[in-house]
Image (cartoon, rainbow, N blue to C red):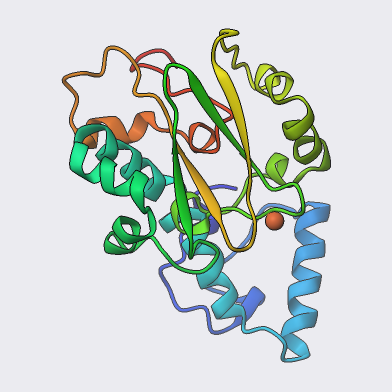
Amino acid sequence: MTEHDHDHDHDHGHGIDDPAHPHNAPLSDVQLRVRALESLLTDKGLVDPAALDALIDTYETKVGPRNGALVVARAWTDPAFKQRLLANASEPLAELGFLGRQGEDMVVLENTASLHNLVVCTLCSCYPWPVLGLPPVWYKSAPYRSRAVIDPRGVLRDFGVELPDDVEVRVWDSTAELRYLVLPLRPAGTEGMTEDELIPLVTRDAMIGTALVQPPGAR
Ligand code: FE
């Protein structure tokens, strides 16, 4: 996806053929199929294309994983906030406006020097939308969903994460009722950094548990 595809600050009353949204490049097979499906649903009156645009844009660009990164950075810099977050995440998240559809009941899992948390949804693809945005494709894939439980260290290794043997790996299975956000370990070398400086270090995968937060300059 390019920036252009989501630069939706104009009114989308005309659906997919909106002349204000020109497409010069040929469409891929998937794009063609999505368009065909969208136009069929629109013709049948089943979806409002403007609402669809707004929904996708909200979760992909406005919400995205940036909300989660802010939560993590704040927890790293504000001990009182962290304490409240770990005790009952829904309350401080609601105050930030990060509760809502697909994220009503949230639990924050703290990674420590001896514990690493990994989140999966073995049944389908439950994911905390308000803090992480749309789930990545691999999160919804059958191999991740089955292997995360059977062989979490193997999955982590595939993601390039090698944990010492004395670090316990705990796997959490999301459900429609309960969704998890991993509070990653704050990397060494970030001691003097502010919340705003820490936010860009926090990746989506680190908040799912399939990555560690790297110190600045390490990526
Ligand atoms: Fe699910």
Ligand 1 positioned in quadrant: bottom right
| Label tally | 0
Task: Answer left or right for 200 relative to 104.
Answer: left
Residue 38, by quadrant, is: bottom right
Location of residue 103 with respect to 140 vertically, above or below = below
Q: Is residue 42 above or below residue 125?
A: below
Q: Quadrant of the C terminus?
A: top left
Nearer to me, 112 or 130: 112
**Residue 48, quarter of picture:** bottom right
The image shows residue 31 at horizontal and vertical percentages of 75, 58
- Residue sitting farthest toward the bottom: 45
Image coordinates for residue 86, horizontal then vertical, percent: 36, 44
Quarter of the image where one finds residue 137: top right
Above or below for 33 versus 170: below
* Residue closest to the eye, 139 or 200: 139
Whole-percent x, y for residue 108 in the image: 43, 44
Q: Nearer the viewer, residue 200 or 92?
A: 92
In the image, what residue occupies the spot 28% across and 59% down? 96
- Residue at image point 47% right, 63% down: 58
Above or below for 181 versus 162 = below
The residue sitting at 78% across, 51% down in the picture is 28
**Residue at 59% in and 83% down:** 14
Q: Position of residue 26 (x, y in %)?
A: 74, 53
